[in-house]
Amino acid sequence: MQVSNKMITTLVIAVAFLTLILLLFKRYVEDYTSDFIDLTIYSSVLNENRKLFIRLPNNYDEKKRYPLIIKSDGNFNLSRWDEVISELSQQGSVNDSILIAIPNLFLSDSRNRDLVPPYARKDVRIEARPASDNSPLIFGKGDLFLRFIETELIPYIEDNYSINNNRILSGFSAGGSFVLYALVSKPELFTGYFSFSPAAWYDNSVVIDEFKKGLNGVKEKPLYLYLSLGGDENAIISGSFKGLLSAIESNAPASLYTEYSYSKGANHELNPYISVPKALKGYYRFRATNAAP
């Protein structure tokens, strides 16, 4: 039987299409499902549905009230968080917690939109933004994402799960810059802020400049900030990290307790993995002497 060129072409297209479907399904499973509770809520602030991954404490009891941890980037290091919280809570070093991980939208470039502060270009660049380049469309929407967390996500969790006022916000890279933005914009929203390898270099270090100015308003209650950097990260992010430490040294109020660490031999991706237990232990040492139970 002779196979025509048309049949071969059709077969190739069919195989390519099936491969694409399988790759998309694999990515969906990896990025948009978790080993925990997966649910979707509608956000009127963002005008879209948002998926949540919810990790409950071991032996979760609705009659008890638990700390709340919110982190960006969904599945990134989510199993690490579960492992560390479980281990340290069994040791008595930390309290077992409800952890909410917010994945980025599937097949959508939502990460920079959500996590870049509203004073930096979401198409992130290191050079200064020209004064003429000021269309509202070019900036990050971290302000909207923070409003979603404050006015929709946290109330949803309060209505459906048993949480107390011990609350942490954590982020990595772009998520780290979002954490810094949230700290100076809504310092009352959380008691602990973890910023792993923060991308503070946007637009000629505008994140550092705005963070430094915003620190003047962080004075109402004791807060904890943990910063970390990988020892093998590039000069751009390392330089901006030093700029953040300098801003804290010059402008942070006494009510903001800051700790930072360098992860020896760690690159950008490895640093947050190493930092999770350090941040949690530091935060609970802080709470032992500076915050209400």
Image: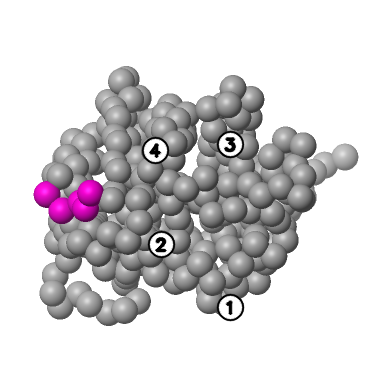
Label 2 near label 1: C-beta < 8 Å? no
For discs 3 and 1, the disc positioned in front in the rendered view: 3
Q: Which residues are magenta?
A: 250-254
The label number, if any, that marks residue 141 in the structure image: none
Q: CA distance from mark 4 to mark 3?
A: 15 Å
Q: CA distance from mark 3 to mark 1?
A: 33 Å
Q: Amino acid at mark 2?
A: Glu
187 up-or-down from 72: above or below: below
Q: CA distance from mark 1 to mark 2?
A: 23 Å
Please name the residue shown 17% across and 66% down the image.
Answer: 129
Q: State the image coordinates of residue 204 (x, y, percent, origin top left).
A: 15, 56
Badge 3 crowding class, 10 Å Cα cut-off, few under 14, some 14 to 19, many 20 or more, is some
Q: Earlier in the sequence, mark 4 or mark 3?
A: 3
Which residue matches tag 3? 95
Name the quadrant containing residue 155.
bottom right
- Outermost residue toward the top in this view: 265
Name the quadrant containing residue 30.
top right
Please name the residue shown 66% across and 49% down the image.
Answer: 65
Q: Earlier in the sequence, mark 1 or mark 2?
A: 1
Indicate whether residue 252 is drawn in magenta: yes
Name the quadrant containing residue 114.
bottom left
Q: State the image coordinates of residue 31 (x, y, percent, origin top left).
A: 61, 47
Helix, strand or loop under label 4 = helix
Q: Earlier in the sequence, mark 2 or mark 4?
A: 2
